[in-house]
Image: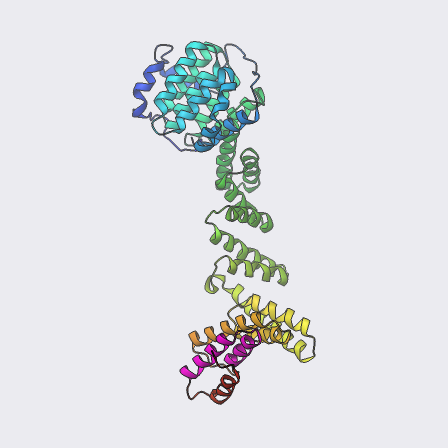
Amino acid sequence: MSHARVQNSRRSAPALASAALLFAAACGPSTESVITAQDPGAQPKVSVAARVHAHSPRLDRLRAALDRGALDEAQEYSDAAENAGAEAPLLRARLLALTPAGTLEALRLLENARTQSPLDPDVYATAAEIYAGTGAFDTAWSEIERGVKACGEAAEFSRARGIVWIARENGARRGLEHLEKARAIDPDLPFTDRALAQAHLLVAKLEMQAQKKKRALEHARLSLNFDPTDVDARRLLADLYAEALDFTAAIALIEGLVQEGRPLRGELAALHKKAGVAALLERDRARALEHFVAARENGMNATDLASGTHVLEDESRARTQLGLQAYEEGRYAAAEENFRAAVRFDPESLAPRNHLAVVYYRAQQYLPAAELWRGVLSDAEKSGVELPDPVHLNLASALKAAGEQGEARAVVDEYLKLHPTGVWRDQTTRFAESLETPR
């Protein structure tokens, strides 16, 4: 069940009308008693001490899955409820409430539990939380009020009040107060982590709307302390970090979500672009380049990257010139480093790819050279660019040197077919004659 649903406080779910009758015999509260139950300042009749809760690895996993609404995982660990003592039927009720059309059966289980343990506050609180999850808020408040009358005040009722409040519009702050009170009474109280996470998230959004960014940041962090997996909280925290110009933290959060398979590459690209612009303003060109490259690698096109595209193209041209100078001076390692950088900054540019292929060929890395030349030829054909060098012959030479005679012949045959009167016709014909005759 989601604790962050925005609902009208006076609307009850019609589908639960018959279920509500299951509990009508005990205490049918008046409107006045409902208002009292909502009052965080109401004085309890009796103070109930925090109880000892059963624990085991499987039982803790079951509670955590139920708290997150993870039905499949909860079903996997459902057998652990047998070791939970009086909490067992309550856990089964929570599991049923997660299933389609399981709410009525869950409420019947709780009624049986009430008969067996009429002074157990967790029975009333669990019922209230299940009702809140369906939008039956009046009935939820009634359950809390009846529970307080029967059992006295308890941490479970503070938890239930908090969950009901955060499910209502504009109830996040009061909900958080009740949840923190519940945790203060019973630090080991189950089913508070997810509710606290949602309460802090909702308050963070309210603080953000009020332009109280520091307080919003604090609540967003607290939300993730209670539920580190929440996608909404992680995105909100990333937004807050970005507004505070902490792009490293913002990018780390969104990258984590992308790695989990969330479709947020566009969001990640936009963050990298912002980080790149900020780095330029700080005169940190190297960092800006890395962010602009990351923005492009995450799907941002040249138009959207805007000034970042021009920065990358300028750097690519500069590194190409440095590579040519190094090559002419016989500093081949430096030439390769600069050409590789130029290709990375502008992968569509033909010149640095061609030069890098030359360096690979010289180092007898024939297949990497052939791959680059093949790409140069293909892109030149698509864009209608006439190459100043016989790149097709370079490609064929690399393939021949790599032992790929058949592929080399296919390259030269294709050139002669497409360009029978081309400027490189004679050289291509002689090269074709130098190849082994196919068997």
Residue numbers of the magenta segment: 391-419
Q: Nearer the viewer, residue 383 or 401?
A: 401
Q: Is residue 75 above or below residue 406?
A: above
Residue located at (51% from left, 52% from top):
268
In the displayed structure image, the side of residue 218 where residue 25 appears, left or right: left
- Whether residue 42 is visible to the viewer of this picture, yes or no, is no
Report if residue 404 lies within the magenta region: yes
Measured from the top left, where is residue 421 in percent x and y? 42, 89
Q: Quadrant of the N terminus?
A: top left
Measured from the top left, where is residue 240 in percent x and y? 54, 45
Q: Nearer the viewer, residue 340 or 31?
A: 340
Measured from the top left, where is residue 322 in percent x and y? 64, 74
**Residue 171 falls in which quadrant of the image?**
top left
In the displayed structure image, the side of residue 97 where residue 280 appears, left or right: right
- Whether residue 359 is visible to the viewer of this picture, yes or no, is yes
Residue located at (52% from left, 58% from top):
295
Q: Nearer the viewer, residue 343 or 213?
A: 343
Q: Which SS type dominates the magenta stretch? A: helix
Q: Nearer the viewer, residue 423 or 169?
A: 423
Q: Residue furthest front?
A: 439
Give the color scheme: rainbow, by chain, secondary structure or one colour. Answer: rainbow
Q: Is residue 281 above or below residue 66?
A: below
Report if residue 276 lies within the magenta region: no
Total numbered labels: 0
Measured from the top left, where is residue 45 in percent x and y? 50, 10
Q: Is residue 297 above or below residue 400?
A: above
